[in-house]
Image (tube, rainbow, N blue to C red):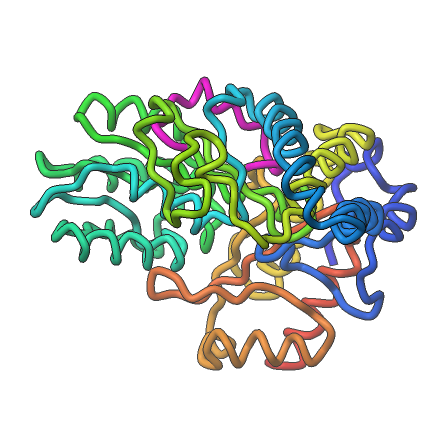
Amino acid sequence: MQSLPSSTDNLFDKDWPDFRSFWNLAPTIAHLNHGSFGAVPRKLKKAQNSWQTRLERNPNGFIWSELEPAMELVRRRVSTFLNTSPNQLLLTSNITNAISTVLASTTLLPGDEILITEDTYPGVKAAVAQAALRFQACVVVVDLPSHNLTPLGISSAILEHVSPHTRLAIIDHITSPTAILLDVTLLTKELHQKGVKVAIDGAHATGSIPVDINSIGADFYVGNFHKWCCSPHSSACLAFSQNSNSLLPGIPGLKDNEGFPQRFEWAGTLDYSAILATPDALSFFDKIGWQRTREQNTTLVAYGARIVSEFFEQIAPAESQLPMQVVSIPSPFKNLGSLNLRNALAKQGVEVAVVDARNQLFLRLSAHLYNRPSDYQKLVKALKKLK
């Protein structure tokens, strides 16, 4: 079994037990799929509960008098974190809701094209398909080969599929099934030169890497905080560059005639506590150190990818800036199928994403502060029992 690289010496070697205790995770399970649903530290769950208690003490008073000022404070904190204006940022519950607002706010005519990729998140694909059907537009899906897991390969394929009819391109900042970081700043510039509006899906970016929305320059940027920022579920945002008066909510509500931000953020009986606790999540990692956290996570997941690749007798993926990496699954394991393999590993106490993408099965490994080298070693042992 390979050892951890010396680059971890000054990170969290001595602190792992302390950080693990911040989460209420079952100690008998190797939790290697933070990328799907995140995990909420006890302190942040307590912050969420505090907001819920404030609501329940006086529901009418809270919703009519306290909610909007509280949301404004969250909006300002989040906009500073992502380097954008609070006047150009909306708070919402998840990425799919945010994308629905993007699609509602994009003028489409019959025959216009919306460009997505094979790696686009299924919920986003579904929202795009519905919008295309409604406006008689076309969805162009960029096929991506399983053997080319490079940012340049994806960017080139996207640009090759742009046509005179392309009106909107929805691009992953970090691809969900294959964990690839794209140069979305350059890609946005090139798409704008072709007259295409750009929406960036930053579901896996916010928190895992530094995000500077103003520098990216996209028309829309959507991100969430319940993954790598570990806020309570569900908390997300939509940043936009156009005038807020030209935006339309994906789902109209009671305050639809009140303009920005009420017509977008007001959802009546929605549990806002996760969104309201988001600043606590950002402060949680401010105290620990974002750079320190990111270095630890990327180092540890690279270790996991190396020992899994070693077991599969294949070359390990190149190390990246991300807390997620994918490893291609060979036979006989891939013959089980994604769901059966996931369940077989879960029965042995290993939770890991088994992803079916680009006609290939991948193990998508994640790392966060609660993980240890032994979690990835446990995965290898579980795989050996399935061989």
Q: Is residue 217 magenta?
A: yes
For the C terminus, the quadrant is: bottom right
**231 displayed left or right of 143:** right
* Residue that appears at 60% across and 56% down: 365
Measured from the top left, where is residue 318 in percent x and y? Answer: 53, 42
Residue 355 lies, with reference to residue 14, above or below; the image says below
Q: Nearer the viewer, residue 328 or 216?
A: 216
Measured from the top left, where is residue 250 in percent x and y? Answer: 37, 47
**43 displayed left or right of 86:** right
Residue 361 lies, with reference to residue 305, above or below; the image says below
Q: Is the magenta region chiefly helix, strand or loop?
A: loop
Q: Nearer the viewer, residue 31 or 312?
A: 31
Q: Is residue 353 magenta?
A: no
Residue 273 lies, with reference to residue 209, above or below; the image says below
* Residue that appears at 40% across and 28% down: 240
| Number of marks drawn | 0
Image-quadrant location for residue 171: top left
* Residue that appears at 67% across and 33% down: 70
Q: Is residue 41 visible?
A: no
* Residue that appears at 34% across and 23% down: 242
> Bounds of the magenta span?
206-220
For the N terminus, the quadrant is: bottom right
Measured from the top left, where is residue 111 in percent x and y? Answer: 7, 46
**241 displayed left or right of 83:** left
Q: Nearer the viewer, residue 139 or 300?
A: 139
Image-quadrant location for residue 297: top right
**122 displayed left or right of 136:** right
Measured from the top left, where is residue 241 in percent x and y? Answer: 37, 23
Q: Is residue 261 visible?
A: yes
